[in-house]
Amino acid sequence: MRSLYDPTAGTGGMLSVAEEHLVGMNPSARLVLSGQELNPESYAICKADMLIKGQDIKNIRFGNTLADDQLGDQNYDYMLSNPPFGVEWKKIQKEVQREADTLGFAGRFGPGLPRVSDGSLLFLLHLISKMRPALEGGSLSRSC
């Protein structure tokens, strides 16, 4: 069993397509889908679409991923995301700063916080913190 995470799940399209692709490559593959979405309409569509497709929705959560990581205790084998580029994180600065100060390297933002205007880097720090450690079967690879 492998896990797939999208912290900006939207309507769930990328999660569903990724699952279809992986199962197409390996019909016996089992994938646990997880995600979180800020927009209430997109969140509702995501859950409805997944239910229609027979997918499990227990790990699809509503809320701001950066201010309130509702899947905080989870790590994932695969992650994908289309974060909102060019968006500042000033509205959630207090929550993020509090987590960084309280948890340090035990949290998501230990390496330091980017400029308030750089929400993309904040999402990248979040994703790195969610990676399954290599000792547990996870790996880091890059595309050439």
Image: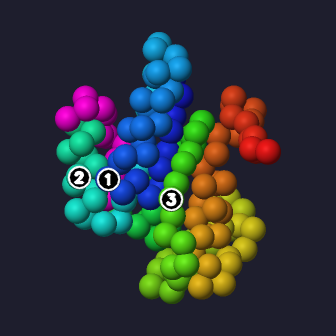
- Range of residues picked out in magenta: 52-62
Q: Tell me the quarter of the image containing the C terminus.
A: top right
Residue on which the image places disc 3: 82
| x and y percentages locating residue 92 in the rendered image | 47, 80
User: Which residue is nearer to you in this view: 52 or 7?
Assistant: 52
**Label 1 neighbourhood size at 10 Å, few (<14), some (14-19), many (20+)?**
many
User: Which residue is nearer to you in this view: 28 or 136?
Assistant: 28
* Displayed quadrant of residue 64: bottom left
User: Which residue is nearer to you in this view: 42 or 129?
Assistant: 42
Type of amino acid at the residue the image marks with label 2: Ile
- Can residue 29 be seen from the camera position used here? no
Total count of labels: 3
Task: Kindly check if marks 2 and 1 are in contact, taking CB atoms under 8 A apart as contact.
Answer: yes
| x and y percentages locating residue 29 in the rendered image | 49, 19
Magenta-drawn stretch contains 40? no
Mark 3 or mark 2, which has the lower sequence index? 2
Residue on which the image places disc 2: 45
Magenta-drawn stretch contains 58? yes
| x and y percentages locating residue 9 in the rendered image | 40, 54
Tell me what residue is drawn at x 72 percent, y 74 percent: 112
Q: Relative to 49, does residue 95 appear above or below in the rendering?
A: below
Task: Kindly check if marks 3 and 2 are in contact, taking CB atoms under 8 A apart as contact.
Answer: no
Tell me what residue is drawn at x 75 percent, y 32 percent: 135
The kind of secondary structure element at disc 1 is loop
Answer left or right for 63 relative to 111.
left
Type of amino acid at the residue the image marks with label 3: Asn
Mark 2 or mark 1, which has the lower sequence index? 1
User: Which residue is nearer to you in this view: 58 or 44?
Assistant: 44
- Can residue 112 be seen from the camera position used here? yes
| x and y percentages locating residue 103 in the rendered image | 64, 66
The extreme right residue here reads 144
Type of amino acid at the residue the image marks with label 1: Thr
